[in-house]
Image (tube, rainbow, N blue to C red):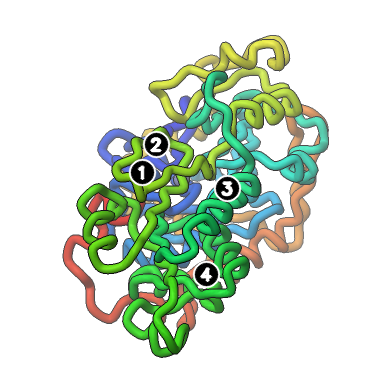
Amino acid sequence: MSGTIIPNTPIAVDFWQIKKCNHVHLFFLSHMHSDHTAGLSPKWNRPIYCSPLTAKILQLRLQVNGRWIHPLEEGVPHMLKLDNIRKETMTVTLIDANHCPGSVMFLFEGYFGTILYTGDFRYTPDMLKHPALNNRKTIDVLYLDNTNCNPDRALPSRQEATRQIVDLIRRHPEHDVMIGLYSLGKETLLRDLAVEFQTCIRVSPKRLELINLLKLKDVFILEETASSVCAVERRRRFYAVDQSEINYNSVIKWNNFYPTIAILPTGREAEKCNKNAYVIPYSDHSSFQELGKFVAALTPSSIVPIVKSYMCETYFKQHLSSPRTTLSNVTIPESVRTFMRERNRRQTVSRCFQRTTIQRVPRGVVFEPLEESFTRPMSAGTQTVNKSETLFLSQKNHLAPSSKDSALLPKKKKKNRYSTGLFK
Ligand SMILES: [Zn+2]
């Protein structure tokens, strides 16, 4: 399970075990894979900050109450308060993580220095051109997706992996194709295959519901109605199925009915379960070589692995800037310390809300007056945040008041739909 409480701050990312983090007031969600959402449920009652697309998927899949979900526009700094007396603030900037729809990295800047939390990400050189990262800002702590941080494992680019899959399918022209996927991610691969083979991809109703939300439905079609729309005569079919369905028994069963190959596009090590099953190293996580390029460009002062069981900093020591900084040495401002000691969140939210005259400010967060421009010294240089823009965006994106967004809520609550493992 992924997730981190940032030491000496009231911040947590992808961490939802509330009993272990009473001092946390600001919860950030990087993306909607189940190993990053374990603990979230319709009963959740703390503010969550995430990308606009993740906000929609979060409501659709886990039925978290929209009043707690605060979508933040990507690419611009947002100011959030860190105490109850409007003294200490921080900014957060969301950067596309190139991992799955809605996935982002978080750049936090505040009394603790500058922290980049990558979440799950697949490196591209364009990331380094992002205004938040290309201004030679000193990254004090880099929380790094080290899923593939192994110098002995080479991974092809996603384009190269797609080419391998296309070649494999071409070698089996009479076969149906089953592609095993998580519930979210690799939609681009499916679309590329549909275009390459001039076909459509058959999906389950649940996957189609998500695809409709992502506005990708042009090459996807529901399993039950596919035959009437996609082909007049029986011809090879392409299916997107859950990754767990790619197993020995399923492949045997499919081949008893029609010649079928099963493809598992994954960067993880997996065994070939049947002669008609193939594992292709298509990964949504950065390869070891890509991690090296990313770290070399950012030259952070320290690296913390997000997958805690794997080390990674030692591989990139030559790229670290000095002196080495760690969050354990951070001095917490007194007002923030008081904020973190506050246990009764409902009272805190109520008091914050009364202090502001703006009625639609997200609960638990107080912004400065609209007219002012906010300037705060950074560890390297100075950055200006236009408060009126930040507040407007936050209000506009806040899901709770929108009748359009509330339509995403299911009419009937389904039992146990949010249990761990449902949404990978
Ligand atoms: Zn992920």
Residue 388 % position (x, y): 71, 62
Figure label count: 4
Q: CA distance from mark 3 to mark 4?
A: 26 Å
Residue hosting label 4 = 214
Is residue 244 or residue 69 the one in the foreground? 244
Whether the residue carrying mark 2 lies under 8 Å from ligand 1 is answered with yes
Q: CA distance from mark 4 to mark 2?
A: 24 Å
Give the class, few, some or many, for how many residues have Cα within 10 Å of label 2's Cα (few <14, many ≥20): some
Residue hosting label 2 = 2
Which circle, 4 or 2, is nearer the viewer?
4
Say which label, 4 or 2, has the lower sequence index: 2
Residue hosting label 1 = 35
Q: CA distance from mark 3 to mark 1?
A: 28 Å
Q: CA distance from mark 4 to mark 1?
A: 21 Å
Q: Amino acid at mark 3?
A: Gln
Which circle, 3 or 4, is nearer the viewer?
3
Say which label, 4 or 1, has the lower sequence index: 1
- 383 vs 111, left or right, is right
Residue hosting label 3 = 164
Give the class, few, some or many, for how many residues have Cα within 10 Å of label 1's Cα (few <14, many ≥20): some
Which circle, 3 or 1, is nearer the viewer?
3
Q: Amino acid at mark 1?
A: Asp
Vertical position of residue 44 compared to residue 401: above or below: above
Say which label, 3 or 2, has the lower sequence index: 2
